[in-house]
C-alpha cells in the first residue's frame, strides 16, 4: 500500500494518445486505404470494384512504369551521387582553404550560398530554370551565342534526347547545399591533430582528403546518400514544373506517373498500385540503409 | 550557385521593351517595377503570402506540440518497446506522400474539409511531427534524469514536469524544429496542389507552380514571379541562418 502511494501511476503513455490518433487518421488509415484501392478498379466515383492483383499484373507489363523507374535511377545519380561527390570537395575546400586563409565568416557566407536553393520552394527553382533553359533566346542559349558557341544551342527541356539531363543538372543545383552543410558540420568533429600529423608526414592536400577526411566523414556520407536517395525516388515538384514528365515521357518519374494516373486519367486503382510499389521500394531501402548504419556504428 | 538568381533579379527589373531589345544578359536600362506590381495583382500574391504564412505557422506550432507530447512519453517516460515505436515514426517520415494523397483527397471531401486550409494544417502537422518525434525523442532520452526525479519527489505531476522543466530546458531544439517545419511546409507542393484547388486558399509555392505549368507568362513576368518567390526564402534564410544550418546537421545525423 505505502509503496503504491509513493510511486505515482505511470501516466507517460497517455501523452502518446493525441499523436497516435493523429497518426492513425492522417498516415496509417490513408496508407491502408491506398493499398486497398490498389486492389480495385475505381474511377474515384461510385464504389470500387475488387480486382485482386490485376493492377499489379498490368504494372509489370507497363513499359512506361519501368521507364519511370529508370529515370528514378538517373535522379539518384543527380540528387545523391553527384551532390555527395561535389559536396565533399566543396566542403573540404571551404573548410581547409577558405576558412583557414580568409576566416570563418567568408566560409559561412559561401556555405549559405550553396544552401540557398534548398530553402527555395521547388516551384521557384522550376520557374527560374525553365526560363534559363528556354529554347530560342533563353539565357543559356543567349550566353552560348554571346561567347561564340551558338552551335551548341539546344531546346534543353523540349528535346526528348536531352530533357532528362537538363532536369538532372537542375537537381544537382537544388540538392548540393544539403551535403555541403552536413559535411562542413562533420568536418568540425574531425580532430585537427590527424590532419597536422598527416601534413608533418608530407601528405599533399589530396592525400589528406583521401586518407583522413573521407574515412572520418563516413557516417555523414552514409546519412547523406541515404536521405538524398530517398528524396530522389520521391521527386515530384521539379518534374511537374520543368517538364510534366515530357517530352514524350522522357522525364517521367514514378511520383508524377502516379499523380497523372490519379488526377488526369482518374484510374485510382492503378495510381494506387504505382504509389504502393514506390512506397515498398522506399521502405525497403530505408530499412536496409538504417540497418547498415547501425551495424557500422556498432562495429566502431 | 546564386548566379541564376542574380540573373532573375536582373531581368525582373527590366521593362518588356528593354528585354526584347537587349535580351536576358544585359543589365537593365533603368529600374522598372511594373512587372512586380502586375504579377503581384495578377496572382493576388499578398493573399498567397497570408495563406502560406497561416498554414506554415500553424503547422510549426501544432507539429512541435505533437512532437513534444510524443517525445515526452518516449524519451522521458521510457516506454517499453520504444525502439519499435521510434522505428515506426522513421518509416512514417520516409513514406512518400503519393501513397497518402488520394485517400486524403477523398476523405477530406467526405468530411467537408476539402479546399480548406485547416485540412492541410492537420495533415502537415502530423507528417512533420513524425520527424519531430524522432529527433526530440533522442534529445529527451539524454535529458538529465535527476532533474525529472527530483521534481517528481517534490510532488510535481508529469504534466507540470513537462511544461515547467522539460519544455523550457529544450527551448532551443524546439525552436530549430519550428523553423524547419515552417520552411518545409512553406515549400510543400504535391498535397497543397491537390487539396487546395481554389485561388483563395492557394499557397505561394502552388500558385507559382501552377502558373509555370500553364506557361502563360512572358519573360519579364516570369522573372518577377521568380524574384517574388525567392524573396521570402531569402528573408527566412537571413533571419534563421544559424538555426537552420544547425538544425539540418543535427536533424539528419541523429
Image (cartoon, coloured by chain):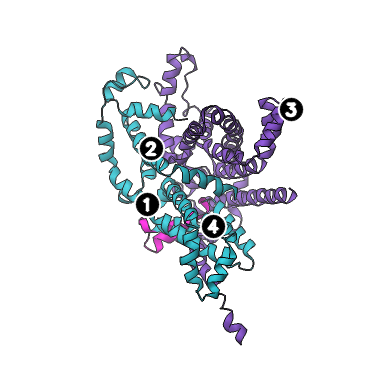
- Give the distance between the C-alpha atoms of the residues marked 4 and 3, in whole angstroms: 43 Å
Disc 1: CA contacts within 10 A as few (<14), some (14-19) or many (>=20): many
Magenta range: B97-118
> Tag on residue B230?
2
Point out which mark residue B196 bears: 1
Query: What residue would you read off at disc 4?
Result: B136
Q: Residues within 10 Å of mark 4 (few under 14, many from 20)?
A: many
Element type at marker 3? loop
Q: Main secondary structure of the magenta part?
A: helix
Q: CA distance from mark 2 to mark 4?
A: 30 Å
Answer yes or no: are tags 4 and 3 on the same subunit: no
Residue A207 covered by magenta stretch: no
| Chain that appears cyan | B
User: Which one is earlier in the sequence, the residue at label 4 or at label 1?
Assistant: 4
The answer to if B106 sits in the magenta stretch is yes
The verdict on a common chain for dots 1 and 3 is no
Q: Chain of mark 4?
A: B
Amino acid at each position: 500500500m505505502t509503496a503504491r502511494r509513493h510511486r505515482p501511476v505511470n501516466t507517460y503513455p497517455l501523452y502518446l494518445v493525441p499523436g497516435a490518433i493523429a497518426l492513425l487518421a492522417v498516415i496509417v488509415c490513408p496508407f491502408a486505404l491506398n493499398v486497398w484501392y490498389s486492389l480495385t478498379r475505381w474511377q474515384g466515383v461510385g464504389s470500387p470494384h475488387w480486382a485482386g492483383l490485376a493492377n499489379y499484373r498490368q504494372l509489370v507489363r507497363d513499359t512506361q512504369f519501368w521507364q519511370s523507374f529508370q529515370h528514378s535511377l538517373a535522379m539518384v545519380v543527380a540528387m545523391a551521387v553527384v551532390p555527395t561527390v561535389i559536396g565533399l570537395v566543396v566542403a573540404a575546400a571551404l573548410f581547409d582553404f577558405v576558412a583557414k586563409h580568409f576566416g570563418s565568416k567568408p566560409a559561412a557566407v559561401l556555405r549559405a550560398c550553396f544552401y540557398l536553393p534548398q530553402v527555395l520552394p521547388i516551384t521557384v527553382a522550376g520557374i527560374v530554370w525553365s526560363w534559363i533553359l528556354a529554347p530560342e533566346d533563353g539565357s543559356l542559349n543567349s550566353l552560348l551565342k554571346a561567347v561564340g558557341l551558338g552551335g551548341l544551342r539546344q531546346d534543353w527541356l523540349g528535346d526528348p534526347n536531352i530533357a532528362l539531363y537538363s532536369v538532372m543538372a537542375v537537381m544537382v543545383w537544388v540538392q548540393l547545399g544539403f551535403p555541403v552543410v552536413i559535411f562542413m558540420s562533420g568536418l568540425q568533429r574531425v580532430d585537427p591533430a590527424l590532419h597536422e600529423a598527416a601534413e608533418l608526414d608530407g601528405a599533399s592536400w589530396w592525400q589528406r582528403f583521401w586518407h583522413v577526411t573521407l574515412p572520418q566523414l563516413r557516417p555523414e556520407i552514409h546519412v547523406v546518400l541515404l536521405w538524398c536517395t530517398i528524396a530522389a525516388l520521391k521527386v515530384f515538384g521539379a518534374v511537374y514544373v520543368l517538364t510534366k514528365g515530357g517530352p514524350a515521357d522522357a522525364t517521367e518519374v514514378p511520383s508524377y506517373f502516379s499523380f497523372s494516373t490519379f488526377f488526369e486519367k482518374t484510374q485510382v486503382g492503378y495510381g494506387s498500385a504505382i504509389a504502393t510499389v514506390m512506397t515498398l521500394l522506399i521502405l525497403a531501402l530505408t530499412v536496409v540503409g538504417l540497418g547498415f548504419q547501425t551495424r557500422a556504428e556498432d562495429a566502431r | 550557385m546564386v548566379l541564376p538568381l542574380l540573373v532573375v533579379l536582373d531581368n525582373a527589373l527590366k521593362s518588356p521593351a528593354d528585354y526584347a531589345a537587349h535580351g536576358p544578359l544585359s543589365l537593365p536600362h533603368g529600374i522598372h517595377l511594373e512587372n512586380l506590381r502586375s504579377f503581384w495583382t495578377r496572382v493576388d500574391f499578398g493573399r498567397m503570402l497570408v495563406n502560406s504564412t497561416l498554414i506554415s505557422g500553424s503547422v510549426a506550432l501544432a507539429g512541435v506540440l505533437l512532437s513534444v507530447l510524443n517525445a515526452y512519453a518516449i524519451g522521458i517516460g521510457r516506454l517499453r518497446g520504444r525502439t519499435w515505436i521510434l522505428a515506426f515514426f522513421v518509416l512514417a517520415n520516409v513514406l512518400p506522400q503519393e501513397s497518402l494523397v488520394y485517400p486524403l483527397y477523398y476523405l477530406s471531401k467526405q468530411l467537408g474539409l476539402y479546399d480548406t486550409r485547416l485540412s492541410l494544417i492537420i495533415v502537415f502537422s502530423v507528417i512533420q511531427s513524425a520527424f519531430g518525434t524522432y529527433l526530440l525523442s533522442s534529445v529527451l532520452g539524454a535529458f538529465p534524469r535527476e532533474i525529472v526525479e527530483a521534481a517528481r519527489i517534490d510532488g510535481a505531476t508529469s504534466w507540470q514536469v513537462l511544461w515547467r522543466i522539460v519544455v523550457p530546458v529544450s527551448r532551443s531544439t524546439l525552436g530549430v524544429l519550428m523553423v524547419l517545419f515552417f520552411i518545409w511546409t512553406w515549400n510543400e507542393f504535391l498535397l497543397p496542389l491537390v487539396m487546395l484547388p481554389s485561388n483563395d486558399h492557394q499557397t505561394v509555392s502552388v500558385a507559382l507552380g501552377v502558373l509555370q505549368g500553364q506557361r502563360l507568362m512572358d519573360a519579364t513576368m516570369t522573372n518577377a514571379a521568380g524574384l517574388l518567390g525567392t524573396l521570402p526564402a531569402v528573408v527566412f534564410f537571413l533571419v534563421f541562418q544559424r538555426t537552420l544550418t544547425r538544425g539540418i546537421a543535427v536533424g539528419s545525423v541523429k
